[in-house]
Image (spheres, rainbow, N blue to C red):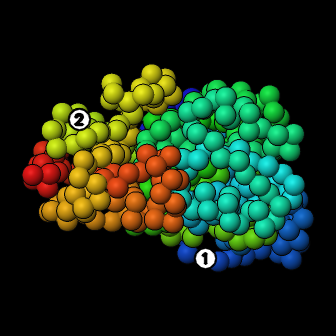
Amino acid sequence: MNEKQGFDTQAIRAQTERGPNREHSVPLYLTSSFVFDSAEHGRDLFSGDADGLVYSRYGNPNVDEFIGKLCRMEGTEDGIATATGMAAMFGTIAALLSAGDHVVCSRAVFGSTSQMFTRIFPRWGITTTFVAPDDLTAWREAVKPETRVLFAETPSNPGLDLVDIAAVAEIAREAQALLVVDNCFATPWLQQPAGLGADLVTHSATKFMDGQGRVLGGAILGPEDLIEHVRFFSRQTGPSLSPFNAWVLSKSLETLSIRVDRHCDNAEAAARHLESHPGIEHTRYPFLDSHPQKELARRQMRRGGGLVTIDLPGGEPEAMAFINRLKMITRSSNLGDSRSIATHPRTTTHARLTEDERLLLGIRPGTVRLAIGLENQEDIIADIDQALR
Ligand SMILES: *Cc1c(COP(=O)(O)O)cnc(C)c1O
């Protein structure tokens, strides 16, 4: 495999060595374990004197294909695949931090990530300070001598606020802490945090990476020395990705850039249309001229992504009625699917937060998140329009 080859070539050709049957498409390896050629071979595999597959909790050809491709796409040396995105977020912190350590985290992070930092890690003596994603002074001032990790997610859900990855990476470097970026919303096609200075990149592969709402998966990517600690943690504690899900996800990666580009085409068109719609109070999309961080968006992202967030003036009753009037767009909580999805964050994904916490994230009673899919643009816009009337 040629390291200089382009993004799509890597996504399609990396890590696809052919087996004895010369399959063109990598087959599914549903096996929990692998055989040893001799007793000595088994001994050498366990001692590390021989390289090879032993047991699917440690490694499997489908999982290795998925993570091998993803490392090339993110531009990282090494990586670990996990069963879900949350297993990746949890595994990163649990593998690298100890009691007494401190995290600085953007307050605009995925709901379960925020619950993990506020309700689970404090029981183990790991504490977190939350900061506004776009306030660099707040990031800097939240750092303490025991800060080990700065954690960011950009663009955020559902506010579509951005974190300046290069600037926060600089703060992390000065603090001798690690910057971890959840790159789920952008995918490596739109944004490569490692190239901007992030130490570790985490993913939920469940969203755009799968792209068709079929499987759960996740990944932790970074330099070999850090991933070595995560690998030890993962091998002993078992958050491994299943071979079947890895097989689905490896096929999906081959079309990531063309799918994400189409998500962006459709989302951009919907955002421009909705911005001028009199029935909408406010439309949020990173590449709209009205987005307060549009320059940063253009600096660190290739395009604006597949999500558009709107605020309806009639508050929750109007948001609920709008969602109920949709004929094609699905009512669900997922995103990054070929099917467009509408979600009311206040009563679903962010229902656990207090009203004040929600308002800080830009979640108002009339906020609706639109995860724009791959249907024809005109049909997506027509469905939104008829539901707005
Ligand atoms: C969905 C999501 C997660 C969690 O991923 P799962 O695969 O559902 O565990 C984490 N971060 C972001 C940004 C997400 O959208």
The residue positioned 33% from the left and 51% from the top of the image is 367
Query: Residue 266: x and y, percent?
Result: 25, 41
Q: Secondary structure at mark 2?
A: helix
**Residue 275 numbered tag:** 2
Query: Residue 107: x and y, percent?
Result: 58, 47
Give 385 or 36, whichever is nearer the viewer.
385
Q: Nearer the viewer, mark 1 or mark 2?
A: 2
Residue 263 against residue 137 in the figure, above or below: below
Q: Is residue 27 visible?
A: no
Residue 3 against residue 346 in the figure, above or below: above
Mark 2: amino acid: Glu
63 relative to 10 in the view: left or right: right
Which is nearer the N-term, disc 1 or disc 2? Answer: 1
**Residue 293 numbered tag:** none
Mark 1: amino acid: Thr
The residue positioned 74% from the left and 33% from the top of the image is 141
The residue positioned 67% from the left and 34% from the top of the image is 138
The residue positioned 67% from the left and 60% from the top of the image is 118
Task: From the image, tell me which residue sits under label 1.
Answer: 31
Residue 253 against residue 5 in the figure, above or below: below
356 relative to 257 in the view: left or right: right
Q: Secondary structure at mark 1?
A: loop
177 relative to 374 in the view: left or right: right
Task: Specify few, some or many for label 1: CA neighbours under 10 Å numbering under 14, 14-19, or 20 or more.
Answer: few
Task: Specify few, some or many for label 2: CA neighbours under 10 Å numbering under 14, 14-19, or 20 or more.
Answer: some
Q: CA distance from mark 1 to mark 2?
A: 51 Å
51 relative to 164 in the view: left or right: right
